Amino acid sequence: MKTSSCADGNHTDCNFMEEIRKILTTLWERVEDLENRSRRNNVRMVGLTEGKEERKNVGQYVEQIIAQGFGLTGSEFEVEWAHRSLVPRSDANKPPRTILI
């Protein structure tokens, strides 16, 4: 017993699958484009000593630095997320990891 395939003359299903494949490819390209655009809007803070912030409070640490540096209050801006770059923590002789905001 054979299963149906494009060679067996079931072209309607094959055409439908091809259209779905094209749509999926287009949507995937759009997702990648949006991800790449969002990465371009990241702000990087370089040279901030590691260990002054708690691991889970990088966002609060960044908010304090921005507030002090620009003379703003916490209600004038919001840091949606912040984290150190995802490389292993360096030793004391190397520069600190970048903070991405």
Image (cartoon, rainbow, N blue to C red):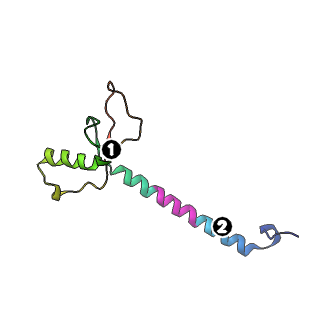
Disc assigned to residue 30: none
Q: Does 34 lie within the magenta span?
A: no
The residue nearer to you, when weighing 39 against 8, is 39
Q: Position of residue 38 (x, y in %)?
A: 37, 54
In the displayed structure image, the side of residue 42 where residue 24 appears, left or right: right
Q: Does 31 lie within the magenta span?
A: yes
Which quadrant: the N terminus? Answer: bottom right
Disc assigned to residue 18: 2
- Determine the secondary structure under disc 2: helix
In the displayed structure image, the side of residue 52 where residue 76 appears, left or right: left
- Give the spatial CA distance, label 2 vs label 1: 48 Å
Type of amino acid under label 2: Glu
- Determine the secondary structure under disc 1: helix
Q: How many neighbours does mark 2 have within 10 angstroms: few (below 14), some (14-19), or many (20 or more)?
A: few
Q: Residue at x 41, y 35 (%)?
A: 88
Image position of 60 with respect to 31: above or below: above
- State which quadrant residue 49 falls in: top left
- Residue at label 1? 55
Q: Residue furthest bottom?
A: 12
**What's drawn in magenta, residue-wise?**
23-32
